[in-house]
Image: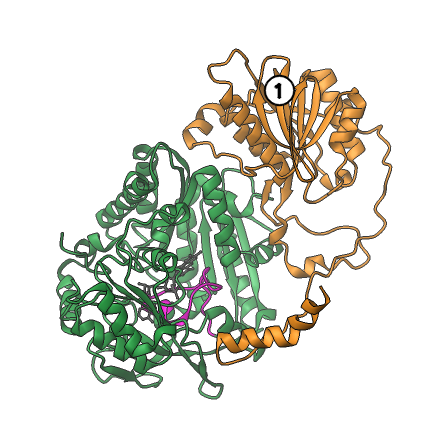
Amino acid sequence: MKILGCFKVVPDLDLIVEEDWNIENHLHIDTGYAKLIWNCFDEGALEMMLRLSDLSEGLNVVYKLSALTIGRQKTESFLKTLYALGFSEGARICVEEEEEILFSPEMISEGIANYVKKIEGQDVILTGIQSSDGNNKMTPYLLAEKFGWPCITQVIGLEPIDEEQLKVTSQVSGGCIVRKVKTPCVLATGNAPCSYLRIPTLKAKMKLGKRPVTRLMPEDMGMSETAESVRVTALNPINRKRNTVVIEADSPQEKARCLYEKYLKERLSEL
Amino acid sequence: MAIISREQIVEGLEEILGKEQVITDEQVLKESSLDRYRKYEQVCEVYTQPIPAAVVYVKSTQEVADVLSFANENEINVVPRTGHSAIEGGLETALKDSIVIDGSTMNKVIKVDEYNMQVTCQCGVPLQELDDMLRERGYTTGHSPQSKPLAQIGGLVATRSIGQFSTLYGGIEDMIVGMEAVFPNGKVCRIKNVPRRAAGPDIRHIICGNEGAICFITEVTLKLFKWQPQNNRYIGYKLDDEYMKLGFDCLREVMVEGYKPSFARLYDAADAQQHFSAWLEEGKAILIWMAEGPANITPAIEEGIKGLMSKHPELEEVDPALIEKWYGGLNWGPEQIAEEKEEILATRNIGITTEVSGSWDNIYEIYKTACDRILEEVPDMTLMGGHSSHSYINGTNMYFVYYYNVVDCAPEEEINKYHDRINQIICEQVIKYGGSIVHHHGLGKARAKYVTQEYGSSYYMLKTLKQAFDPNGIMNMGTLIPLRK
Ligand SMILES: Cc1cc2nc3c(=O)[nH]c(=O)nc-3n(C[C@H](O)[C@H](O)[C@H](O)COP(=O)(O)OP(=O)(O)OC[C@H]3O[C@@H](n4cnc5c(N)ncnc54)[C@H](O)[C@@H]3O)c2cc1C
């Protein structure tokens, strides 16, 4: 079974200095200095693929794992990491100005769909539910629509069945559903139980990580013709600051009493 | 060890301090039996060290003196603690029924003396809070270790810590003025605050760096400096990793020519990718400096460094804004520690650091041969690299950074299979080439086993100090001087 993991490399937004969030009349946040990391949902999806492959050991099913990213040259080291972890195919659609696709899930899904149609056919496409910078939350749905494949979101587990089917666990409000899913399909991970990807050893990197990445041009993947359905006209930071009061008192008991009397008692009586 | 029972120890402590200040909660005791040296055991919540009898929170110098006298009379091992960010096993309770004396409740800033440019505070003052408060007034201690959001004054002095701006301000040993400390027999000693004196040996250095193995530090006076970040200048160059030797020479050149930048750093390519992956090509090392100080000095330092570096065609200048913004996200607080724990548990991949120093003529060999040997001899390595971050006229430090996967190994075996083995290789290479095995984290218990090699004939002085001040052997046993098997 051929599974494609689609991932995005994003800046670590925790490292953005406060003044850079002050967006005054411009549509750009400078993240160029922040270290690059896997988009968290995609990282969980890639680890899920590896775990599925681990589970298939000794079974009569072989998973061919591929990975695709759309982004600048710097993202290739991430594809090489995946090679070192056992992915057999790694491709990049070369978009050097990532800002241009930040809010364009249409372009992204078009690029992925054309990769699957023209370059490497797949049985399953796995994505994260959204990226931490674009936050569009649309790519898996658009992909499923393009192919006419079923789409399951909030996937938290994959288990092997056979070459045509997967056991897919997904979260729904109040519980989990476990389904046997016939491929082809699109799956999207949400809060995966393991959101961290395993780390390859330096020896594995030396041995497997040197293979070249397949580079594709956006125009060949139909991305340039895709019309943007939305355009950014303004960005506003959300003020997450909260007012705080420090309760001063001599003992924890007194502090607790003050907290109760002044701030909780009235609210509790309203419950 | 202790000549009274665990129950009697707790009773005795409760008599001195009252029940509220004596903690015997099982989980607290377990977590107080170790530090980040056993990071893997810590995150897996597996505790292999003797569990202390109690953790006590002290509120005054007198309470410290009373607890120490009690421990001394009853031969109970005590482990002083403040911020709990130690890295080298200094907080491990190596002996049965130890008492952990936590000074974080002695957290008052006693005096900010702007005229004499010094600040006096108790041992439990968190450095971040102190420096934030000072900066609001236009001052700084100049001390900025990466653990600034975690560490407190007592621990910072006890470990001879160093901050990122050390090339200008020095290590903590250059910042301390006077101090107050309590010795195991309960004797309280105060060293007065004067700019300098030549009245015999500098006894501050019996206290500074004692790692809780000689005395308990209760109060410290530190120097103040003007804080003028608006004048800061950043300078950066990238170079191929194969030119690391040149990188060290560039650091040297700046020092030798007499410039005093506030930080001076050289990252090898492996380590650089952990920080600058957004814009730095793989395989590139990086050199960075920051100039700090009065407005007419920082541009001169910048110009001077650039002039020196322009003679090296192997270097390519980088946008200083990238360095400046990167620097803002360097420190580690409780959130990073919590995130790291989750990551280690999920991936079984762990990152550790070991810091050493060397002269200009041996630091490259130390760096290169230690990295090569580790890669050759230790399994499951996922990253091996490092950086130099503190330079002097006669040499620099090397901060090894290494990650490995913990494979087929119970948490309690990890330390032997990986961490100690790597530490040993680094220490062996440092000793072979003539550097120091500890640059700023302290010997702790992890590296105490190499103390005689580190000190050579001067070990006599360290041992005599320990015996003289702690004749009953109650102060953080196993730290600085290894326990006899
Ligand atoms: C993420 C991270 C980054 C770090 N970066 C740096 C860095 O940049 N530079 C640096 O120098 N260190 C660094 N460290 C190491 C550590 O933060 C320092 O050693 C610091 O000085 C410890 O201070 P603390 O208050 O946490 O002490 P603790 O961890 O509580 O104790 C450290 C040692 O000092 C002794 N001690 C503590 N308080 C007293 C006291 N009142 N009297 C006598 N002995 C005492 C303890 O017994 C122990 O041996 C880092 C640590 C971490 C976790």
Q: Based on the displayed image, in which of its 4 quarters is residue B344 positioned?
A: top left
What amino acid is at disc 1?
Leu
Q: Which x, y percent locates residue B163?
A: 43, 64
Residue A90 visible from this viewpoint: no
- In the picture as drawn, the residue positioned furthest to the bottom comes out as B115
Nearest the camera: B362 or B128? B128
Q: Which x, y percent locates residue B41?
A: 36, 47
Q: Chain of mark 1?
A: A
Q: Residue at (21%, 62%) from the top-left corner?
A: B477
Q: Which x, y percent locates residue B244?
A: 42, 44
Question: What residue is disc 1 on?
Answer: A166
Nearest the camera: A168 or B90? A168
Instruction: Kindly report the secondary structure that dominates the magenta region of the rendered protein.
Output: loop
Q: Which color mode does the image show? A: by chain
Nearest the camera: B14 or B49? B14
Colour of chain A as rendered: orange
Q: Which x, y percent locates residue B148?
A: 47, 64
Q: Residue at (61%, 52%) from the top-left corner?
A: A14
The secondary structure type at the circle numbered 1 is strand
What's drawn in magenta, residue-wise? Answer: B141-164
Q: Residue at (23%, 79%) from the top-left corner?
A: B186
- Tell me, yes or no, whether the highlighted magenta stretch contains residue B248: no
Colour of chain B as rendered: green
